[in-house]
Image (cartoon, rainbow, N blue to C red):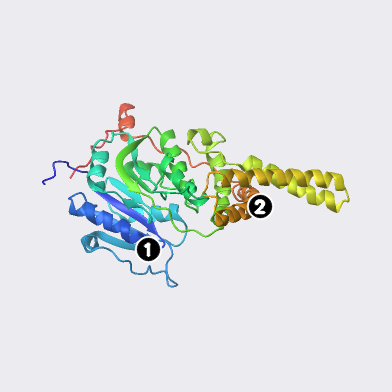
Amino acid sequence: MTSVLTSPPYAVVVPTIGRPSLGACLQALAAAAADGYGPVRVVLVHDRPGADGTPPPLDVPPALRPVTTVVAGGARGPAAARNTGAAAVGPVPWIVFLDDDVVPGPGWGADLARDLTSAARDTAAVTARIEVPLPAGRRPTDWERNTAGLATARWITADMAFRREALEAAGGFDERFRRAFREDSDLALRLLDGGWTLASGSRRTTHPVRPADRWVSVRLQAGNADDVLMARLHGHDWWSRAAAPRGRLPRHLAVSAAATAAVGCALLGRRAAAAACAAGWLAGTGEFAAARIAPGPRTRAEVAVMAATSLLIPPVAVWHWMRGHALHRGARRRGPAAPPAAARAAAGEGTPREQVLS
């Protein structure tokens, strides 16, 4: 069937650490190319380079090889890797960022073309609809529920198309965010503050649940340091502006304080006070574990993991929160993105550029 939809040219940037899931992502892009809606450029930013800084070879489908480039990211995190990729794509009006563990759905290319052509002139980015498949026949585990939260995230760069002009106006991603956490919300808020808009698209992308070990929930507490940076950059109301869940940090602080007080009182010989503080710590820890166990499959293995990690998460979360305050105490806001060209033209500052179409 001959396509009747004309798409603006776009490039795809995929930061990767060489996960096997990258193959399925690239195959989906190849299918989009076969349908006539492929990217004009694909840049794979390998963020775990070899000892000499040269990225290893990646298995790229034949249909994409003529337009694909692999560059080294320097292992500085996804924000820096996306900036590296954006700088390497060339002069295209749209850049689509994909994670290496997502799979664009059937008809993704045509849907993307529809998203881009329908974007208003002041639209900085168009998000995809993320779907997280969960196992049938049982309740999801804690890790599976955590991943499922991506489906309702307000802005998620697992599949997000940015207008090059807007991305450049914002100065790209803030590379102080070294993890795949909050860097997308930070950029979105700067764009909104600059007068740009963000739109929801029609294309669908699947984000499978990656395999993870039993301690993944403990490692995720490093995000508390990123939340401190967000507050430094955007004020304490950033939670509501980004529609981000607040999490349990206040409770983790209380539980950790009770545990610390119990130890301190015991060392001072104040047994009654130590017992009271220990009871508070046990009650808080038990409530936390129960809240995580109740919606899950409640298997013996899952219950054991929830019990063990519920002991560790509160102090680890508090540690990263304190680390964030120390690390980002001098952080300064970069400022909002420059306003859209259309807004500048209305203010007499220039003529808006027309959207480039193929």
42 to the left or right of 289? left
Mark 1: amino acid: Pro
Residue occupying the point 49% across, 42% down: 334
Residue occupying the point 48% across, 48% down: 140
Residue occupying the point 66% across, 51% down: 315
* Number of numbered discs on residues: 2
Residue 67 drawn at (x, y percent): 24, 59
Q: Secondary structure at mark 1?
A: loop
107 to the left or right of 4? right
> Could you classify mark 2 by the number of other residues whose Cα lies within 10 Å: few (under 14), some (14-19), or many (20 or more)?
many
The disc placed on residue 311 is 2
Q: Nearer the viewer, residue 206 or 279?
A: 279
Query: Quarter-wise, where is residue 162 in the image?
Result: top left
Q: Secondary structure at mark 2?
A: helix
Q: Is residue 28 above or below residue 344?
A: below
The disc placed on residue 20 is 1
